[in-house]
Image (tube, coloured by chain):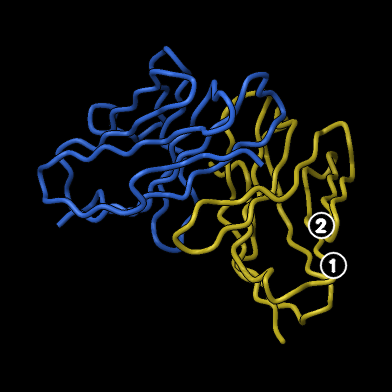
Chain colours: A yellow, B blue
Amino acid sequence: DQQVKQNSPSLSVQEGRISILNCDYTNSMFDYFLWYKKYPAEGPTFLISISSIKDKNEDGRFTVFLNKSAKHLSLHIVPSQPGDSAVYFCAASAGDDKIIFGKGTRLHILP
Amino acid sequence: GAVVSQHPSWVICKSGTSVKIECRSLDFQATTMFWYRQFPKQSLMLMATSNEGSKATYEQGVEKDKFLINHASLTLSTLTVTSAHPEDSSFYICSARGFGSMNTEAFFGQGTRLTVV
């Protein structure tokens, strides 16, 4: 049973435009959500997180939105840059329990 | 962000031998460390969670006698792949969370590419 779902395996966005990556979860006990960026043969790099008591968290070009009623979160990157091309993982945890990852979305930024 | 160092970054071993992978938190004390495995073009699969000074908790389907995890100190966890076989070839990644780790991010090591020949 997949508790964290990223239904789009890949996404292509023009440079300078907004990239929106989506994530759904099923476990209502999750109270902390994270986004990681990963390049091949490297460990994931933490990008941004959000607690379940908030519905938005912004850090520079990255904004994460959380819709608890829909069990949905999204990562917005604006403006998109060539260096943003990577695989993005959505992740969630309940308290200090293990972090569960989605399958990832490969983002391609087009010139 | 905090630094997690994983060593070695790649290793090739013969079938039947054992391989040890180290994961160190360099600038914080990690009460909890996680070990993941990633197959090509697939997500990160959590193998086990280890808390300092106690036995690791393995995910369903992960053989605890094959993947030995030791978390002897607050800055070091090791994963030993025992009697490795070619199907164990994969990318293994550790991550660590610090004290008061509720609602905090986990920091990841660089990963270890294991090839069993």
Residue extending furthest toward the top: B53
User: Residue at horizontal 78%, vertical 56%?
Assistant: A75
Q: Nearer the viewer, residue B81 or A33?
A: B81
Question: Residue A34 shows which numbered tag?
Answer: none
Q: Nearer the viewer, residue B15 or A6?
A: B15
In the figure, A71 relative to A97: above or below? below
* Disc 1 packing (10 Å; few <14; some 14–19; many ≥20): some
According to the image, label 1 marks what residue? A78
Left/right placement of residue A94 relative to residue B95 reads: right
Q: Secondary structure at mark 1?
A: loop
* Disc 2 packing (10 Å; few <14; some 14–19; many ≥20): some
Left/right placement of residue A77 relative to residue B60 reads: right
User: Residue at horizontal 46%, vertical 39%?
Assistant: B94
Callout 1, which amino acid?
Val
Q: Are marks 2 and 1 in contact (CB under 8 Å)?
A: no
According to the image, label 2 marks what residue? A62
Whichever of labels 2 and 1 marks the residue nearer the N terminus, that label is: 2
Q: Quadrant of residue A22?
A: bottom right
Residue A15 on image: x %, y %: 77, 80
Q: Secondary structure at mark 2?
A: strand
